[in-house]
Amino acid sequence: MAVPKKKTSKAKRDQRRATWRRKAALQAQKALSLGKSILSGRSTFVYPSKEEDEEDEES
């Protein structure tokens, strides 16, 4: 016979959501920081430019 599961407490639920939101906020902060560094030209991040992509396709 099926038995209903126990209800998850509000504290446990809030803890899970806080962890999820913290992870999401950290990723958003990293993405914004990377975008700013690329736009400022001080980036050490290597990414392909459109000119290089077009040259590779022609070869």
Image: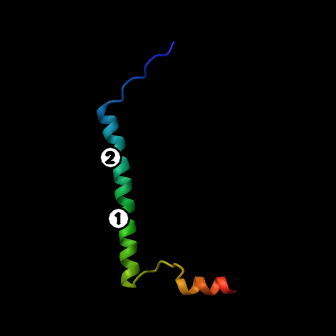
Q: Which disc is residue 7 wearing?
A: none
Residue 6's place in the image compared with 45, above or below, is: above
Mark 2 surroundings: few (<14), some (14-19) or many (≥20) residues within 10 A: few
Residue under numbered circle 1: 29
Check disc 1 and report its element: helix, strand or loop.
Answer: helix
Residue 15's place in the image compared with 35, above or below, is: above
* x, y percent for residue 44: 46, 80
Among the two numbered marks 2 and 1 on one chain, the one whose residue lies closer to the N terminus: 2
Determine the image quadrant of residue 59.
bottom right
* x, y percent for residue 22: 34, 53
Residue name at image x 54 percent, y 80 percent: 48
* x, y percent for residue 58: 67, 86
Count of numbered circles on the image = 2
> Identity of the amino acid at label 1?
Gln
In the displayed structure image, the side of residue 51 where residue 29 appears, left or right:
left
**Farthest residue toward the right?**
59
Check disc 2 and report its element: helix, strand or loop.
Answer: helix
Label 2–label 1 contact, CB within 8 A? no
Residue under numbered circle 2: 18
Determine the image quadrant of residue 43.
bottom left
Residue name at image x 34 percent, y 37 percent: 13
Residue name at image x 39 percent, y 84 percent: 42
**Farthest residue toward the top?**
1
> Identity of the amino acid at label 2?
Ala
